[in-house]
Image: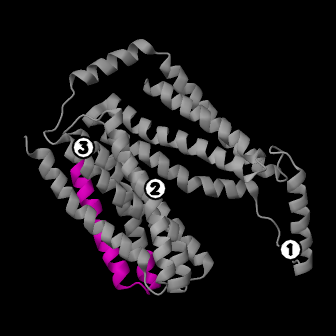
Amino acid sequence: MNHFLLLGMSMLATTIGLYLTPFCKTATLLIAMMSVFGVSFGALDTGANVLILTLWGDKGAPHMQALHFSFALGAFLAPLLAKLAWGTAPAQNHTESDLDTVMLNRSSNGASDSVFAVPDDMNLLWTYASIGTYVLVVSVFLFGLFCKKHSRQKKSAASAEGARRAKYHRALLCLLFLFFFFYVGAEITYGSYIFSFATTHVGMEESEAAGLNSVFWGTFAACRGLAIFFATLLQPGTMIVLSNIGSLVSCFFLVLFDKSPLCLWIATSVYGASMATTFPSGVSWIEQYTTLTGKSTAFFVIGGTVGEMAFPTVIGILQEHYPDLPVVLYTCLGSAIFTAVLFPVMYKLATLHL
C-alpha cells in the first residue's frame, strides 16, 4: 500500500477519534475510540519508519533520529500544554453525605443520557478539538504527497534496485524483535512506575516524584534531539553501544543505591538520556545490512509494542507481591544486561557474509 495514503488515512482516523472522544458518555464507546487510536497509532509508528527507510535507506540515520525526536517531544509537551489549556479545578471540601449525593445524581444522569453528549468541561472539548485539527492538517499534507504519483514511483524504483538481504535475514529480525521487546518494555516500565517507586520506596514528596518523572522524559527528548546531529558523525552501531553502556551503568547504580534520592536523580537523567537513541539507531543499523520492507519493519515494531504491554502488567503484579523490593529497578537492570549481550550477537550475524 502507498505509504503516504496509509499514513494519511491513519491520521484521518486519529482526527475522527480525537473529535469524538470528548462526546463519549459510555465506557463501551470510549473503549471503541481508544481501539481506533491503537490501530491508527500502530500504522503510524510502523509506516513512518518504513517511509524514512524508503526515502533515504541506510543514509537516513539523522532523519530517523528526527522522526523519533518528534515522538519524544510530543510526549513531553502534550501533557504540559493540556494542563495549561484545562487549568486546575479549585479544591472543594465535601462531607461524605455530600459526595454520596453527587455520585447518586451522576449515576441517575448517566443512566438517562445518550451515548453521545456535549461534555460539561468545555476546556476538555477544545483541547481535543485543537489537537484533532492539528492532526487533520498533517493528514491533508500526506494526501497531497500521495497525489504526486510519478515522483513516488521513481523513488520506489530506485530503492528497489539497491535492495539487499543479509545471509541470516530472518534470524536477525527475530533477535531484533527480542531486542526491542526488552528495550521498549524497560523504557515504558521505568517511565510509568518511577513516580510510584519514588514516593513509596524512596519516600519522596509527590511534587519531587513528579519532577523526577519530568527529568526522565525531558532528558529522553533532549538527547533524541541531539542525536539528530550525532547521527551525522557516529555510526548507528556505535550509538547503540554507547546507549547500552549508559543504561547498564545507570541501572547498576540505581539498584546499588536504591534508597538514595541523589542517586535516583542523577541515574534517572542518565538512564533517560541513554534510552533515547536506541530504537531509531536500531532501525538505522539493521538497514545497513538488510533492506527492510513493511512486513519486516512491522515484525520488530510488534516486538516493542508487546514489551510495552507485557512489562508494566507483569511488574505491577510482582511489585504487589514483593512491595519491599525495587522490582522496577531489577527489571530495568535485567533488560539492560540482555540488550547489551544481544547486540554483539546480532552484529556477528549481520557481518558474517561480509
Tell me the quarter of the picture where residue 108 sits: bottom right
Q: Is residue 252 above or below residue 148?
A: below
Residue density around tag 1, few if under 14, some if 14–19, many if 20 or more, within 10 Å: few
Q: Nearer the viewer, mark 1 or mark 2?
A: 1
The reply to whether dot 3 and dot 2 touch (C-beta < 8 Å) is no
Residue 221: assigned label: 2
Q: Which mark is residue 286?
A: 3
Q: Are marks 1 and 3 in contact (CB under 8 Å)?
A: no
- Which image quadrant is residue 18 in? top right
> Which circle's residue, 1 or 3, is located before the other in the chain?
1
Q: Is residue 94 left or right of residue 19?
A: right
Q: Position of residue 283 (x, y in %)?
A: 31, 44
Q: Could you tell whether 347 is left or right of 265 in the image?
A: left
State whether residue 100 appears in this view: yes
The residue pinned by badge 1 equals 92
The location of residue 265, given as percent across then percent down, is: 45, 76
Query: In the rendered image of this protein, does residue 321 appear above or below residue 350?
Result: below
Label 3 to label 2: alpha-carbon separation: 23 Å
Q: Is residue 5 above or below residue 81?
A: above
Q: Quadrant of the N terminus?
A: top left
The span picked out in magenta is 236-265
- Circle nearer the N terminus (3, 2): 2
Q: Compute the Cα span from label 1 to label 3.
A: 56 Å
SS label for mark 3: helix
Residue depicted at x 65% and y 53%: 81
Which residue occupies 44% across, 87% down? 259
Tell me the crowding category of disc 2: few under 14, some 14 to 19, or many 20 or more residues within 10 angstroms, Cα based. many
x, y percent for residue 161: 22, 21
Q: Are marks 1 and 2 in contact (CB under 8 Å)?
A: no
Main secondary-structure element of the magenta-colored stretch: helix
